[in-house]
Amino acid sequence: MTQTTAGFGDSRTGCAETRLVISVNRILNVSMKSSTARAVSVHLCTLLILHLGSVMLHAATGLSRVNHVVVIGVDGLGSEGVRRVNPPNLARLRREGASTLNARAVMPTSSSPNWASMIMGAGPEFHGVTSNDWQPWKFDRAPTTVGSGGIFPTIFGALREQRTNAVIGVFHDWKDFGRLLETNSPNVLKHVKDAIETADTAIKYLRQNKPHFLFIHFDGVDHAGHAFGWTSVQYDKAVELTDSLIGAILDTFENSGLTEKTIVLVTADHGGKGMKHGGPSNEELEIPWIIKGPGVRSGLEIHSAVNTFDTAPTLAHVFGIKAPECWVGKPVLEAFADVAKPPARAD
Ligand SMILES: [Zn+2]
């Protein structure tokens, strides 16, 4: 496995600048023939200046130091459970990073539509993953856009296409997660049964490969909810166990000397009510969205509206890659230092 030393910020800005300069020059060569074309070239130069401004902003915000991103998705971890249990590692991430417990899942609050929305930057009406019965070849609604993997584009496909050397590892406790992304995009896409085994496998991979993008899915909290109820003692124990696994993963980043270059994002697909989920109640719809790392504000309670489909665009922002045009989510800019707070969405 290769390991690049330059941060995502270093490689991406150089690349984007070069492309833009080339396109401006190309148009400048043919532009002197008409005043309209001259106006176009002036406009493009203005865009270049604005782009350079955003590059400088990225450098100022510390995102240029980011070389690793880890997303930990906890199946069935509603915000109510986080509030009630307040487990130590999530509490620490919230103290040291930016977070909200008012982030929302999409409807229906079942697993596949929500994992899909999280990584596809859009809701089920766009990507077509409307239920757990969905398969890439079997669906009720066709996706509005089909990407390179034959499905609506995900953050994994977008990163692979724009950063061909990126090291990407995906470890999922729930088998069906693996069908929701471009299966050729990660270097490793592995279903590992059981949360502890999943953490263990991901930690070994992290130590050996220092991936740029590590995605870990845990399923134990959802299992406890379905078996014992979303407010049961067993559910709370599962939250505590998963939190300790998150702690072990964060310790591995620390012991590998990567913490200063790593963005951590912890979120969930949905919560639950009684012994199930799928409906529109707060207990089912509200999910935690917690981000920490260089360039992220510390101890910030995010007030802008966050939906799970904002996760992929936020990751694209962190990686410095272009979000596919079919995505409708927006990066959660409020979470990042030195970025003006965006207005709250009305939805
Ligand atoms: Zn789920």
Image: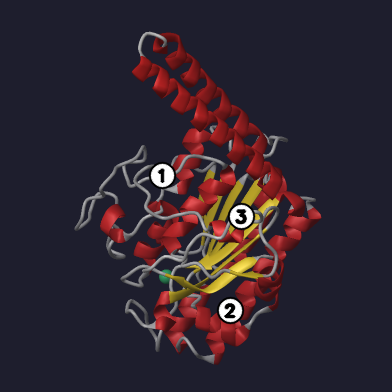
Helix, strand or loop at label 3? It is strand
- Picture quadrant of ligand 1: bottom left
- Which of pointers 2 and 3 indicates the residue nearer the eye? 3
Helix, strand or loop at label 2? It is helix
Q: CA distance from mark 2 to mark 1?
A: 29 Å
Mark closer to the chain start, 1 or 3: 3
* Residue 189 horizontal side relative to residue 300, left or right: left
Q: CA distance from mark 2 to mark 3?
A: 19 Å
- Tell me where residue 246 sits by quadrant: bottom right
**Label 2 belongs to which residue?**
239
Residue at the spot 46% in from the left edge and 66% down from the top edge = 344
What label does residue 70 carry, if any? 3
Amino acid carrying label 3: it is Val
Q: Is residue 283 above or below residue 112?
A: below
Amino acid carrying label 1: it is Glu
Question: Where is residue 17 shown, x and y percent of the image?
Answer: 57, 27
Q: Identify the image quadrant of the C terminus.
A: bottom left
Residue at the spot 61% in from the left edge and 73% down from the top edge = 242
Helix, strand or loop at label 1? It is loop
In this view, the residue farthest toward the left is: 140
Question: Where is residue 24 shown, x and y percent of the image?
Answer: 48, 20
Question: Where is residue 153 shown, x and y percent of the image?
Answer: 38, 45
Mark closer to the chain start, 2 or 3: 3
What label does residue 308 carry, if any? none
Q: Is residue 206 above or below residue 244?
A: above
**Label 1 belongs to which residue?**
182
Amino acid carrying label 2: it is Val
Q: Is residue 204 above or below residue 36?
A: below
* Residue 313 horizontal side relative to residue 264, left or right: left
Task: Choose between 22 and 278: the one closer to the eye.
Answer: 22
CB under 8 Å between discs 1 and 3: no
